Image (spheres, rainbow, N blue to C red):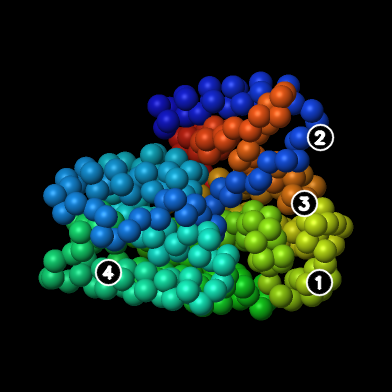
């Protein structure tokens, strides 16, 4: 973790000096970079036929790590803190979910071609899962091969439910009718990932561990929905919030140009954020065993992201709400792209501290 964060801290200071030399009005020009997996980079998606069957186990695990590094940097940092005995299972499950969830563009486009591609991808991974837990040869894909090697630590049925949840998310375009529907979806995705990690560490049956994973998963999933709002608004002219919330606050037909900074949108974001914080606090109050808490460090990253959103006064168009602006402009107006890891050194240090304490 220290090796990973050292260049990130240096990069952050470099970009911070550059940011301090630009006009204050340009602070709002950067796009929000999602820190969670609900929306993920299309470039990280991999083709099932593009891998060599001669790759070594170390190559396969390296692929899983780099996939998570590009999709969800906070989850990648959590994985670096896991002991070697469970790290491959952690990255294999996260990589499977990243592949199943697909790219941001496929979720946002919503056209028939993209939906068909999503269905084909999910069916391919369902077949790969059958092969990984069966006796037939697994596909020549690093994630499938790591799953085969780690299958004794990873229960199959939760993985199948995770794929079903991703299929439902794709079929509905990521939308939900109510807050209760959204809570169930986050429990079936983020919560399932955490419970699978507990199972890999043989911690799922420990007192309060599964319930804490449920609360952390719901909290993290709700925060991911808040962070995804700017990209959804740019692509679809709407926010990915439950329909009952959008209707209650009059957001369904609002002007996309002024939606997120509006008082109604801030109130809606605060309602979802308050619910997310309640779930994160419930997980803390359970006071699970130290090793179980170390499996649920995603709650620390989620709380950090929520603090940034609250600090921005629930204005999701503010750069601080997403953590780091993706594009930054220098004194002469030049554009350069910031590495995603550059702005995550604070959450990395928090993760290390909470891992050392064994507390959420």
Label 4 belongs to which residue? 129
Front of the two marks 1 and 3: 1
Query: In the depicted view, which residue is nearer to us: 246 or 106?
Result: 106
What label sits on residue 253 in the rendered view? 1
Q: Quadrant of residue 163?
A: bottom left
Q: Are marks 4 and 3 in contact (CB under 8 Å)?
A: no
Mark closest to the chain's N terminus, 4 or 2: 2
Mark closest to the chain's N terminus, 3 or 2: 2
How far apart in space, not on screen, are marks 2 and 1 (Cα)? Answer: 28 Å
**Tag 2: Cα neighbours inside 10 Å, few (<14), some, or many (≥20)?**
few
Is the residue 255 above or below the residue 287 in the image? below
**Tag 4: Cα neighbours inside 10 Å, few (<14), some, or many (≥20)?**
many
Is the residue 20 above or below the residue 151 in the image? above
Mark closest to the chain's N terminus, 2 or 1: 2
Label 3 belongs to which residue? 314
Front of the two marks 1 and 4: 1
Residue 171 x %, y %: 51, 77
Q: Residue drawn at (68%, 72%), measured in percent from left and top?
A: 242
Residue 15 relative to residue 91: left or right: right
How far apart in space, not on screen, are marks 4 and 3 (Cα)? Answer: 40 Å
Q: Secondary structure at mark 2?
A: helix
Mark closest to the chain's N terminus, 4 or 3: 4
**Tag 3: Cα neighbours inside 10 Å, few (<14), some, or many (≥20)?**
many
How far apart in space, not on screen, are marks 1 and 3 (Cα)? Answer: 20 Å
How far apart in space, not on screen, are marks 1 and 4 (Cα)? Answer: 42 Å
Residue 185 x %, y %: 54, 71
How far apart in space, not on screen, are marks 4 and 2 (Cα)? Answer: 50 Å
């Amino acid at each position: 973790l220290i090796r990973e964060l050292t260049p990130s801290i240096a990069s952050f200071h470099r970009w911070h000096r550059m940011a301090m030399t630009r006009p204050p009005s340009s602070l709002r020009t950067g796009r929000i970079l999602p820190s969670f997996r609900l929306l993920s980079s299309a470039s990280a998606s991999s083709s099932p036929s593009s891998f060599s069957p001669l790759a070594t186990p170390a190559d396969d695990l390296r692929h899983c790590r780099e996939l998570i590094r590009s999709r969800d940097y906070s989850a990648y940092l959590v994985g670096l803190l896991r002991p070697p005995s469970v790290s491959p299972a952690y990255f294999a499950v996260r990589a499977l979910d990243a592949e199943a969830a697909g790219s941001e563009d496929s979720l946002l486009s919503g056209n028939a071609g993209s939906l068909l591609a999503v269905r084909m991808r999910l069916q391919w991974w369902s077949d790969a899962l059958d092969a990984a837990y069966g006796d037939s040869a697994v596909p020549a894909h690093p994630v499938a091969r790591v799953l085969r090697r780690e299958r004794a630590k990873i229960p199959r049925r939760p993985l199948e439910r995770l794929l079903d949840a991703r299929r439902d998310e794709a079929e509905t375009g990521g939308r939900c009718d109510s807050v209760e529907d959204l809570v169930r979806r986050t429990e079936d995705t983020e919560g399932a990932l955490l419970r699978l990690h507990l199972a890999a560490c043989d911690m799922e049956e420990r007192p309060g561990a599964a319930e804490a994973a449920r609360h952390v998963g719901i909290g993290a999933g709700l925060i991911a929905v808040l962070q995804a709002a700017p990209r959804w608004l740019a692509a679809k002219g709407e926010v990915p919030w439950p329909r009952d919330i959008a209707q209650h606050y009059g957001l369904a037909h609002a002007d996309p140009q002024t939606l997120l900074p509006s008082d109604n949108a801030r109130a809606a974001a605060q309602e979802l954020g308050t619910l997310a914080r309640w779930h994160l606090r419930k997980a803390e109050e359970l006071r699970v065993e130290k090793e179980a808490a170390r499996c649920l460090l995603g709650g620390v990253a989620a709380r950090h992201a929520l603090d940034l959103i609250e600090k921005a006064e629930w204005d999701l168009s503010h750069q601080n709400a997403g953590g780091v602006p993706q594009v930054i402009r220098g004194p002469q107006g030049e554009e350069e792209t910031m590495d995603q890891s550059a702005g995550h050194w604070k959450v990395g240090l928090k993760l290390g501290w909470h891992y050392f304490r064994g507390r959420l």
